[in-house]
Amino acid sequence: MAKPDHRSRAGKLGGATTKRRHGGNGFYAEIGSLGGTATMRLHGQEFRKHRRRGGECTKERYGVEHYQRIGTKSARCKQERIRLRNEAMQAMLDDGWKIPTIIKLTWDDLPRLEKYMENGLGTYLEDERPETDSEHLFVSQSGRPLSLANTYTVMSRYHADDD
């Protein structure tokens, strides 16, 4: 096996040092984003042409049905996440909880919610809750805390669908 040269070792050492200094605060994501932005500014037209051509090749190979299957699967997954969240919230509403209280619940409140863990809350939190840094248990599809007005609308619509 060939021995790595000094440039390779220096690069690995520099990368390890940078990761140790900046690894946990989004440094690499920020650098990648800046690089992507600069690349798109310089070569955006060229990439747009390649993406379009790639999409046309995929459509030729797999057909329009391929895109329809992907869209259907994505919508089904999204609806399942929302359904589990809404079922857990509905169980709490049925027990007399109020929406303003429910949407403010955080991870620290879990011991009080043991009763609901089997009613969909456990599955929602473990498998279906969007990845987010939010401390709130119930979040939107984008991972942000639920707003009061929107939650009233969603839950009244969800309740009407059950009837």
Image (spheres, helix red, strand yellow):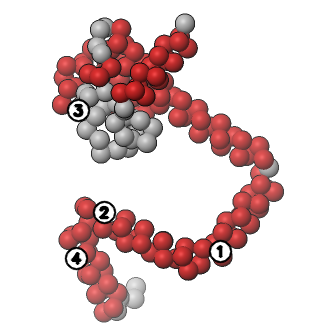
Disc marking residue 26:
2
Name the residue carrying label 3: 107
Type of the residue with mark 3:
Trp
Type of the residue with mark 4:
Thr
Picture quadrant where residue 142 is located:
top left
Q: Position of residue 21 (x, y in %)?
A: 20, 71
For marks 2 and 1 on the same chain, the one whose residue lies earlier in the sequence? 2
For marks 1 and 3 on the same chain, the one whose residue lies earlier in the sequence? 1
Numbered disc in front, either 1 or 3:
1
Taking the image as shown, residue 119 lies to the left or right of residue 101, namely right
For the residues labelled 4 and 2, the Cα–Cα distance comes to 15 Å
> Is 72 located above or below residue 43 in the figure?
above
Disc marking residue 45:
1
For the residues labelled 2 and 1, the Cα–Cα distance comes to 28 Å
For the residues labelled 2 and 3, the Cα–Cα distance comes to 24 Å
For the residues labelled 3 and 4, the Cα–Cα distance comes to 34 Å
Q: Quadrant of the N terminus?
A: bottom left
> Is 43 located above or below residue 61 in the figure?
below
Disc marking residue 17:
4
- Kindly identify the residue that appears in the image at 25 percent across and 38 percent down: 135
**Whether residue 20 is visible:** yes
- 18 or 11, which is in the foreground? 18
Q: Quadrant of the C terminus?
A: top right
Residue farthest to the bottom, as pictured: 6
Q: Secondary structure at mark 3?
A: helix
Q: Position of residue 110 (x, y in %)?
A: 22, 26
Numbered disc in front, either 1 or 4:
1
Type of the residue with mark 2:
Gly
Q: Position of residue 109 (x, y in %)?
A: 20, 26
Numbered disc in front, either 3 or 4:
3
| Labels 2 and 1 touching (C-beta < 8 A) | no
Q: Secondary structure at mark 2?
A: loop
